[in-house]
Image (tube, grey):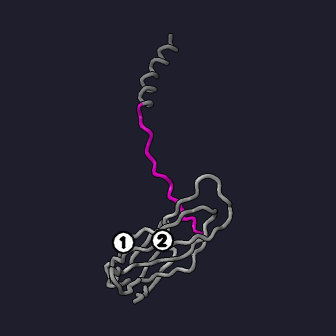
Amino acid sequence: MRLRIGLLGLLPLAACTQDMPEPETAPPPQDCPVLESRNWHAWIDAMPGPDAVRTLNISGEVDLPTAGYEASLKAGPADRAMPPGQRFELELTPPEGMAAQVITPTPVKYRAEAAYPAYRVITITCAGQEITTMPDVIIAE
């Protein structure tokens, strides 16, 4: 008889714990997989002509741990200096499925209408880590 009372007394406690939601956890921060980077250039194409548009161009190369990554740059915030400096985030999409485990040089390119007539500096980051800074962005006229 005592055993029955003891088990019955625990039932309400067991029911309470089943209704408790799992605590939400944020995904762990991802590290930038870039091993090396080089050959970074930034310039504004301001060549005259019909329908000419000032275009910001950025190019460089990153070494990644496997083949098959896709790399792109996403424009980020600009500072308030004149001319401004602007940040760009390197976005990397890993390959799906199996990939060769070999260090792979991967080109990075950006081309879009320039938001400003000139830039003081362009900074490239990856997962919050600075990869490179390109001061004095030239204007090709």
Which element carries disc 1, helix, strand or loop? strand
Determine crowd level at label 2: few under 14, some 14-19, many 20+ residues with C-alpha closer than 10 A. Answer: some
Look at the image and tell me in which quarter the C terminus lies. bottom left
Measured as percent of width and height from the top left, residue 77 is found at 36, 71
Please, which residue is most extreme toward the front here?
50
**Quarter location, residue 117:** bottom left
Say which residue appears at 56% left-offset and 59% top-offset: 94
Q: Amino acid at mark 2?
A: Thr
Check residue 118 in the rendering and tell me which mark sits there, or answer none: none
Q: Amino acid at mark 1?
A: Pro
Q: Is residue 14 above or below residue 96?
A: above
Left or right of residue 66, residue 8 in this image: left
Q: Is residue 30 magenta?
A: yes
Measured as percent of width and height from the top left, residue 92 is found at 52, 63
Magenta part of the chain: 19-34
Check residue 125 in the rendering and tell me which mark sits there, or answer none: 2
Secondary structure that dominates the magenta span: loop
**Quarter location, residue 104:** bottom right
Q: Is residue 98 above or below residue 23?
A: below
Q: Is residue 70 above or below residue 120?
A: above
Determine crowd level at label 1: few under 14, some 14-19, many 20+ residues with C-alpha closer than 10 A. Answer: few
